Amino acid sequence: MTFDPADTRLRIRHGPSGEVLVAGSVDLSGARALRRELTAAAARHRPLVVDLTAVQLLQSVGVAVLHDLADHGLVLRTRTGSAVASVIRITGLIHVASIEFVEPEQACDGTHRPPEPAGEA
């Protein structure tokens, strides 16, 4: 699969180890879907690992979803130095979740592949 960074549609898929891989923009239009997917995953997996390495935009509504799930042993994976990493720090998610920073060249490779757009997988 080829990842187009200009494609900002929210995409969510589940990895082989139960992690939730998110790509695109986490904004108001996708927050309900993100909450639904993460809540379902949290019921099956602890800790809840959310890979955000392919997320370009994390708006406050997405931060609220992640904060709400912090009591599920939340682990957030993001690219070192990314805008999402800054949002995680600024909003305090760094204090309520475990954070895994990956180098940009590791993001979206075989291990950290972004999900397909909804309906195209």
Image (cartoon, grey):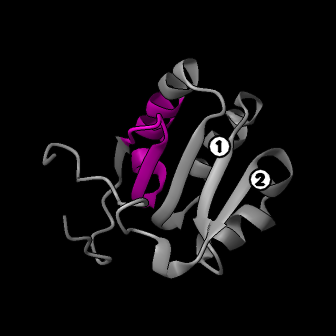
Task: Identify the residue position indicated by label 2 in the image.
Answer: 93
The reply to whether the C-beta atoms of the residues labelled 2 and 1 are less than 8 Å apart is: yes
Looking at the image, residue 30 lies above or below residue 73: below
Q: Position of residue 19 (x, y in %)?
A: 49, 41
Please, what is the three-letter code of the amino acid marked with disc 1?
Leu
Q: Position of residue 23 (x, y in %)?
A: 39, 59
Please, what is the three-letter code of the amino acid marked with disc 2?
Leu
* Mark 1 residue crowding within 10 angstroms, few (<14) / some (14–19) / many (20+): many
Q: Is residue 20 magenta?
A: yes
Looking at the image, residue 43 lies above or below residue 92: above
Closer to us: 46 or 116: 46
Name the residue: 22% across, 45% down. Answer: 118
Q: Position of residue 106 (x, y in %)?
A: 48, 73
- Determine which of the numbered discs, if any, sits on residue 4 in the image: none
Q: In this picture, which residue range is highlighted in magenta?
A: 14-38
Q: CA distance from mark 2 to mark 1?
A: 8 Å
Name the residue: 70% across, 28% down. Answer: 72
2 left or right, relative to 49: left
Q: Earlier along the polypeptide chain: callout 2 or callout 1?
A: 1
112 left or right, relative to 85: left
Name the residue: 39% across, 42% down. Answer: 15
Kind of element beneath mark 1? helix
Res 74 quadrant in image: top right
Looking at the image, residue 120 lies above or below residue 77: above
Task: Identify the residue position indicated by label 1 in the image.
Answer: 66
Given the current orientation, which residue lies at the most extreme top position?
Answer: 43
Q: Position of residue 27 (x, y in %)?
A: 48, 55
Given the current orientation, which residue lies at the most extreme right position?
Answer: 95
Name the residue: 24% across, 53% down. Answer: 116
Kind of element beneath mark 2? helix
* Mark 2 residue crowding within 10 angstroms, few (<14) / some (14–19) / many (20+): many
107 left or right, relative to 101: left
